[in-house]
Image (tube, rainbow, N blue to C red):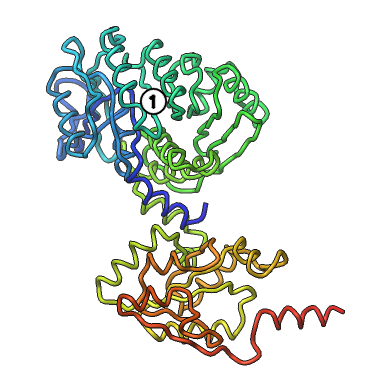
Amino acid sequence: MERKDVESLFIQASELTLLVIGDLMLDEYLWGKTERISPEAPVQVVDVTREELRLGGAGNVVNNLVSLGCRVSVCSVIGADDNGTVLRHVFTGMGVDTDGLYEDPMRATSKKTRVLASNQQIVRIDRETKQPVSSEFEDRICAYLREKGPSFRAILVSDYAKGVLTERLLAEIIGIARALHIPVLVDPKGNDFGKYGGATILTPNRREAEIASGVAITGEESLVRAAKTLLDRVDLEALLITRSEEGMSLFLRDGTVTHIPTTAREVFDVTGAGDTVLSMFSLALAGGRMFADAAMLANIAAGIAVGKVGTSTVSPREIVEEVGHGHRDSDSKIKNLDVLSGIIAAEQDKGRRVVFTNGCFDLLHVGHVKYLQKARGFGDLLVLGLNSDASIRRLKGPERPLIGQEERAHVLAALDCVDYVVIFDEDTPLRLIETLRPQVLVKGGDYTREGVVGHDVVESYGGRVELVEFVDGKSTTNIIEKIRRSGK
């Protein structure tokens, strides 16, 4: 995916509501230092210097989604205890909908306490209930799903085998979601993945996939065999197997296999990386992205997460920067309209004068460069609307453009005089002009003011039109004809 498309996904995220169902818990971290052995027993004494409480289990999935900018609802069963009160309070403070959060006086809210010294975990203490929830709470969750289901764009099932996700409840969740055409994405647990039958996608790690499929994964052939076994056995649309330092592998029902290598980086803590994968993949899928693009983004997010200590989240900015790493200069200037509109509005609020021009810019030449430099001189920043390949074919015929839209965009974005490039698919840039509201609209000297698309819009709010003469004899058509003649 291009950087501009990832930026658009995160703008879209605020309009997407995702539901997380699963085992909630609190992760308590006690940070300290150890410099002595206890006189009571041959154990280290940790002098605690800092305490931290984080959302764990399915709660970390919620936390990741919120960090990614989604609207989030949570559904689970917790204890009627102090830890349950803390969980509810934290969710409410994050803006998470807790209508599907039920309290069972017979359960203890899960809490895991980790003691760390010098960034190394010394011991973990678990306090939790693992018994399956009663039929009463299964019924309440099902009723909640039937009522609220149509408002969700995806359902994330985060199974930590603590008793909330019973086999009956899993079957009901998947059945209700399929009836509503809502994707169900599962981070699985246990030896039998059959309980997730009919889900859209599972995201096991390699060891989990080995155990569930009964196939020892020793290489690519056995990996594919294990994946096919699970796809068929569990009736999935797709399977994403995380493979630690080897990255991820995506398997689709139609037989398509995509291997995604990991990005080399220092690993500090893999805690919660699976939650990050599930969250990012779900957001992308809910936003209409293809499985392969969703997996690529999930891989990037996981790589960032493992570079942090504890069940950490990742931010849209971190992911966007990682995606744009390959084209750090030009890529950062290419935006989709939904992202660019916010940037331009903020610049105009600062009093900056925005100049807009547009064109095909096929086979960039000195005439184009001089034109753009002059256009930039009319204001503080220049936005260039670039005709897409499809619009050029409609305007100039099936043999054009000679250079694809992404290549043209990167070449133009590399020019110092161009501040932003936005590709448009319409025959005219009118929608861009209406949305961005530039103060100056620039076109070539072969136009009249009245013939410039959008002149009336710009002038209606006090803007102006500027016409710039092109360098004589310099045009893409002339260059093409010269090349053709020289080839004869």
Specify whether residue 203 is in view: yes
Q: Position of residue 383 (x, y in %)?
A: 43, 73
Q: Give left or right: position of 9 versus 2.
A: left
Residue 205 horizontal/vertical position (percent) = 49, 28
The residue at the point 24 percent across, 30 percent down is 27
Q: Which residue is farthest right?
A: 488
- Which residue is at the front of the view, 185 or 203? 185
- Quarter assignment of residue 361: bottom right
Residue 415, x across and y down, in percent: 50, 77
Q: Is residue 270 visible?
A: no
* Left or right of 381, for residue 137: left
Q: Is residue 342 above or below residue 367?
A: above
Q: Residue at x 38, y 64 (%)?
A: 435
Which one is nearer the viewer's eye here, 460 or 229?
A: 460
Q: Name the residue located 45 percent from the left edge and 80 percent from the top edge.
A: 417
* Residue farthest to the bottom, as pictured: 472
| Residue type for callout 1 | Val
Asked if residue 405 lies left or right of residue 109, the reply is right
The residue indicated by pointer 1 is: 157
Disc tally is 1
Q: What residue lies at 36% left-to-right and 50% top-to-bottom? A: 316
